[in-house]
Image (spheres, rainbow, N blue to C red):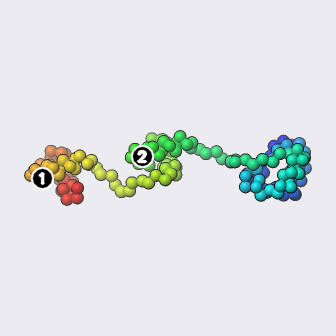
């Protein structure tokens, strides 16, 4: 029937006989490394004498959907400061997968500040120079409540 077969079960004497009966022209048997190491040396030698080569295969199964290039792209975008949701939109990779591909990179927690460091420093500097909060709010286009918050908490 087949010259090459892949098995997922341990190679016992009964299993080997069954395979040879079903496939008289068998030349090669592949199996996972773990099964290959558990197979008796006697069975491997006997199969070799019959002209059947048994060899381990590193990986068989569903191939990975995302390559190392995708993983590096996700990680570099995270290091640039993008959020997982933004990365998902850019790369068209599902959000859960972005979290999986991020690897060991820690995400910054909490909300991002609306006003950058320079704006906050300008607010504090203007207040130190004696400018009222209402005027600071009007000049910089920042809500009055936010000006008070920046002055109190930084």
- Residue at the spot x=23%, y=58% of the render? 153
Seen in the image, is 145 located left or right of residue 41? left
Image: 9 above or below 80: below
Quarter residue 86 falls in:
top left
Within 10 Å of disc 1 (Cα), the crowding (few <14, some 14-19, many 20+) is: few
Gap in angstroms between the C-alphas marked 1 and 2: 36 Å
- In this view of the protein, can residue 46 be seen by the observer? yes
**In the drawing, what numbered circle is on residue 128?**
1
Q: Nearer the viewer, residue 144 or 112?
A: 112
**In the drawing, what numbered circle is on residue 73?**
none
Quarter residue 13 falls in:
bottom right
Seen in the image, is 129 located left or right of residue 101? left
**In the drawing, what numbered circle is on residue 79?**
2
Q: Nearer the viewer, residue 17 or 144?
A: 17
Check disc 1 and report its element: helix, strand or loop.
helix
- Residue at the spot x=9%, y=52% of the render? 130
- In this view of the protein, can residue 142 be seen by the observer? no
Quarter residue 43 falls in:
bottom right
At which x and y percent is residue 78?
Answer: 43, 47
- Residue at the spot x=90%, y=46% of the render? 50
Number of numbered callouts drawn: 2
At which x and y percent is residue 112?
Answer: 33, 52
Q: Of callouts 1 and 2, which one flags the residue occurring earlier in the amino acid sequence?
A: 2
At which x and y percent is residue 143?
Answer: 20, 51
Seen in the image, is 103 located left or right of residue 61? left
Which quadrant holds the N terminus? Answer: top right
- Residue at the spot x=23%, y=55% of the render? 154
Q: Which residue ends up furthest to the left in the rendered image?
A: 130
Check disc 2 and report its element: helix, strand or loop.
helix
Within 10 Å of disc 2 (Cα), the crowding (few <14, some 14-19, many 20+) is: few
At which x and y percent is residue 66?
Answer: 56, 44
């Amino acid at each position: 029937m087949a010259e090459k077969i892949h098995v997922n079960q341990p190679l016992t004497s009964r299993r080997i006989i069954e395979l040879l009966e079903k496939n008289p022209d068998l030349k090669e048997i592949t199996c996972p490394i773990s099964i290959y190491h558990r197979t008796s040396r006697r069975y491997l030698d006997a199969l070799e004498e019959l002209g059947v080569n048994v060899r381990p295969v590193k990986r068989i199964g569903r191939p990975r959907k995302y390559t190392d290039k995708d993983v590096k792209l996700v990680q570099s975008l995270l290091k640039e400061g993008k959020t997982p949701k933004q990365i998902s939109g850019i790369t068209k990779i599902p959000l859960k997968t972005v979290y999986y591909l991020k690897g060991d990179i820690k995400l910054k927690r909490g909300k991002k500040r609306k006003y950058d460091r320079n704006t906050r420093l300008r607010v504090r500097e203007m207040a130190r120079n004696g400018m009222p909060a209402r005027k600071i709010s009007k000049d910089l286009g920042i809500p009055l409540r936010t000006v008070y918050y920046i002055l109190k908490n930084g």
